[in-house]
Image (cartoon, grey):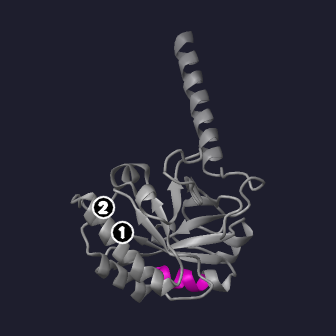
Amino acid sequence: MKAIKWGVFWLLLAGVAAIALWQVAIRWHPVESQYPTQGPVIGAEQGEVHWPTLRAAGADFAYIHATDGDTDRDPNFAAHWRAAHEAGLRHGAIHTYELCRLAIDQATNFVATVPDHEDALPPAILLDFTGNCTDRPNLDIFIAELANFLEIVERHAQSPALIYVTREFDAEYEVTRRVERSFWLPRRLFKPDFGAVPWVMWEASDIRQVEGVENPVRWNVVRPNQPG
């Protein structure tokens, strides 16, 4: 009986510790003294967003999901774009690049969706195998298509794009080595340790809860001494 009681005690203690660690994890972000410029990614999955509260909670900027592939658009993009501007929060648009869709069609989708505001942050292009089609073009075809996409989108935005690329995607397509752009790299808790060039922005958490946003966000920091 005593062994059972001790077993229950340790299980309860482990449960309390797990809850405490989770509460720390969902609020963690890199310290502002090292990374003074920080902000979230906002899309439909974040639910309701009160932009003035988000800004007051420490967001210096936000990237907003706009388009996916050649036809899909985030249903909340226009409202978020307008509200971020009204709140005085710097903001940029994200396009999720699909490997099995033509670059020109994807660029057309982005251009038709995202206003060419002069005060907007550089457009961000998300390169990730997760949720992408299973067809993978060879390296030369992919690089050529991406170049076509970037030419159209950057002409529309009048700014070089920021490229978000995962470790797995970069390992296969060598994006950070073959494409001369600024890069946004993800790694949880620790600074990114991949890429052929230094990162400009780091996605440090994908579970942060922040005031003003209904659901958890992906939280990012800008490398100090970088523009934006």
Q: CA distance from mark 2 to mark 1?
A: 8 Å
> Magenta stretch: residue 74 in it?
no
Position in image of residue 123 (x %, y %): 50, 75
Taking the image as drawn, is residue 1 in sight? no
Taking the image as drawn, is residue 25 in sight? yes
Question: Which segment did they paint magenta?
Answer: 76-83
Position in image of residue 138 (x %, y %): 24, 59
> Magenta stretch: residue 82 in it?
yes
Left or right side of 206 for 105: left
Q: Nearer the viewer, residue 191 or 79?
A: 191
Query: In the drawing, what numbered circle is on residue 132?
Result: 2
Q: Residues within 10 Å of mark 1 (few under 14, many from 20)?
A: many
Q: Nearer the viewer, residue 20 or 95?
A: 95
Q: Residues within 10 Å of mark 2 (few under 14, many from 20)?
A: some
Q: Earlier in the sequence, mark 2 or mark 1?
A: 1
- Picture layout, residue 54 above or below residue 19: below
Occupied quadrant, residue 20: top right
Q: Are marks 2 and 1 in contact (CB under 8 Å)?
A: no
Q: Please name the residue that numbered disc 1 is placed on.
A: 97
Residue at (68, 81) in percent of width and height: 87
